Image: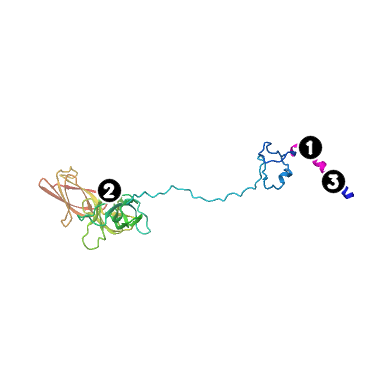
Amino acid sequence: MRVRGATAGWAAARMAFAIAVLLAVPALAQPFTSGTGSGGPMPIAPGAAPPAASLAAPGPSDVLRPPGNIPIPVAPLPPPAQVERTPAGPALTAPSVPAGQVALYLTARFGKDLPQIPSGIVWRVYPERPDHTGAMRLIREDKTAAPTMLLPPGSYIIHASIGNAQALKKVQLRAETVRETFDIPAGGIRIEGKVGDARIPAGQIHFDIYKGSQFEPGDKHPLMQNAMTGEVMLVPEGTYHIVSHYGDGNAVVRSDIRVQAAKVTDVSVTHRAAIITLKLVTTAGGEALANTQWSVLTPGGDVIKESIGAFPRVILAEGEYRVIARNEGRSFQHDFNVVTGVDSEIAVVAQ
């Protein structure tokens, strides 16, 4: 009995405590709603635990949702994985190919494993067979480094040239795009002339270029004539010989060189010569006589240069010479020497 009384007394005390709480906090007596009814969400004091009803398991038709003004604690999500992205470049679009045409992409290089030729190429397209007259009719010409040509399907002869170097290839076009690379093993020659350490001015010297060595037998025709100082001449890879003409006398030098693909070969030709000015005078130190005819000869009598005038100039190779001056039916002669790099005035006295 004492146990029952204690139990009853304990139950009564618990009931009294609950009533006191309800009387002290009237708001807690309001029924818990989802926060969408007319009564609005149930206010909860900061830091207070939600009422018991909110912790009860929901029934089948009673899904509990926290009030709209109560923040829902959510565990922080892990940061997204960092993905390295390559900046997007401009969109590469192939040129539109009209119906009945095939795209032909052309490039040229100096040779296998050598750089692409950046400029100076002339592309020519010919049909595979000549026309009814027997001529190969030019279909297309392009001077860009890497052209794209649109042509009807068929067989073509493609000719590519840069300077004096060239390549030829037969190309078959069907329905798909065709890419062709031409190997043109070309190199450059750049020449200058000197007398001693002095550079010969461009207007006084010119060069002829021949294929092969000067010591090879047979007649040779110049591949290029009258090339000027500092000019880059493009030729196929190989051996060449250069004939350097200093002035229009006998100052001529021959040189053999080797040209490599994709390289410019610089050549310096040294002349042993000098510039000689001639004049005919009546007395030493006198004025030059006009209308004088001149002949410059070797000691053996070979004529090197002929001219007319009061002060003719002639560029001569180092050595011994004889000059003959003719004026008013009279002839005068004089022997002289030419020393390399020593430009001189030779006066012939009319006696």
Residue 191 visible in the picture: no
Residue 286: image tag: none
Q: Secondary structure at mark 2?
A: helix
Q: Which residue is mark 2?
A: 202
Q: Tell me which label, 2 or 1, sits earlier in the chain.
A: 1
Q: Secondary structure at mark 1?
A: helix
Q: Is residue 197 above or below residue 45?
A: below
Measured in 3D between alpha carbons, the distance from the residue under mark 2 to the one under mark 3, in whole angstroms, is 127 Å
Toward the front, the furthest residue is 61
Q: Residue at x 71, y 44 (%)?
A: 54
Residue 241: give x, y in percent of width and height. Answer: 26, 58
Q: Which residue is mark 3?
A: 10
Q: Residue at x 80, y 40 (%)?
A: 19
Magenta span: predominant SS is helix
Residue 177: give x, y in percent of width and height. Answer: 36, 54
Characterize the local packing of mark 3: few (<14), some (14-19) or many (20 or more) Cα atoms within 10 angstroms: few
Q: Nearer the viewer, residue 262 or 216?
A: 262
Query: Mark 1 belongs to which amino acid?
Result: Leu
Pointers 2 and 3 in contact (C-beta within 8 Å)? no
Query: Mark 2 belongs to which amino acid?
Result: Ala
Characterize the local packing of mark 1: few (<14), some (14-19) or many (20 or more) Cα atoms within 10 angstroms: few
Q: Is residue 204 above or below residue 211?
A: above
Report the magenta residues as a range: 14-28
Q: Tell me which label, 2 or 3, sits earlier in the chain.
A: 3
